[in-house]
Image (tube, rainbow, N blue to C red):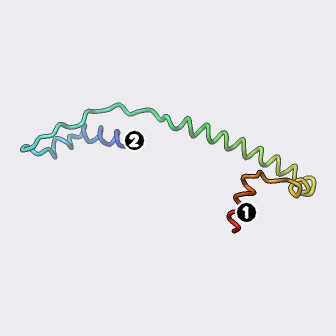
Amino acid sequence: MQDDIKERNRKSKEGVFKATNDPKRPLVPPAVEAVPPHLISRQWRMLWTAGSIMALDYRKALEQANASGGAALASASLPKSIKCSSKASAD
């Protein structure tokens, strides 16, 4: 969206719309718009932080499980939703 607005504003400043205008059917060039700020960057930052925290938690849990020789992994149970989906895909 930002790139489109920047491109349109650039073409308007350079006079592209006036140069390509048909005198028999004149068109009004688009108005110059303000470029919106990067709102999505905040959301990406929040997702990146959450993903990093989850990765650290996973690493800690894996290290704890491996420290006991993997016994915790052998006795771990899967949630019902995962068990059901794995049975359905095996059929």
Dot 1: within a 10 Å radius of its alpha carbon, few (fewer than 14), some, or many (20 or more) residues? few
Q: Which amino acid does label 2 sit on?
A: Met
The percent position of residue 74, horizontal first and vertical second, equals 88, 58
**Direction bottom: furthest residue:** 91
- In the image, 45 versus 81, the foreground residue is 81
> Residue drawn at (92%, 57%), measured in percent from left and top?
69
The part of the image, by quadrant, that contains residue 29 is top left
Work out which residue is located at the far top of the displayed protein and give it: 34
Write down the residue under mark 1: 87
Q: For the C terminus, which image quadrant?
A: bottom right
Which disc, if any, is residue 78? none
Residue at 76% from the left image edge and 52% from the top image edge? 80
Q: How far apart are marks 2 and 1 (CA)?
A: 44 Å
Provide the residue designation for mark 2.
1
Left or right: residue 57 versus residue 40 is right
**Residue 88 location (% of width, % of height):** 69, 63
* Location of residue 82 with respect to 54 vertically, above or below: below
The image shows residue 37 at horizontal and vertical percentages of 45, 32
Q: Is residue 18 left or right of residue 79?
A: left
Classed neighbour count for the residue bearing mark 2: other residues with Cα under 10 Å, few (<14), some (14–19), many (≥20): few
In depth, the one of 88 and 31 nearer the eye is 88
Q: Is residue 35 left or right of 71 when viewed as pictured? A: left
Please give the name of the residue rendered at 35% of the width and 31% of the height, measured from the top-left corner. Answer: 34
The amino acid beneath tag 1 is Lys
Asked if residue 71 is positioned above or below residue 12 in the image, the reply reads below
Labels 2 and 1: the sequence-earlier one: 2
Q: Residue furthest left?
A: 24
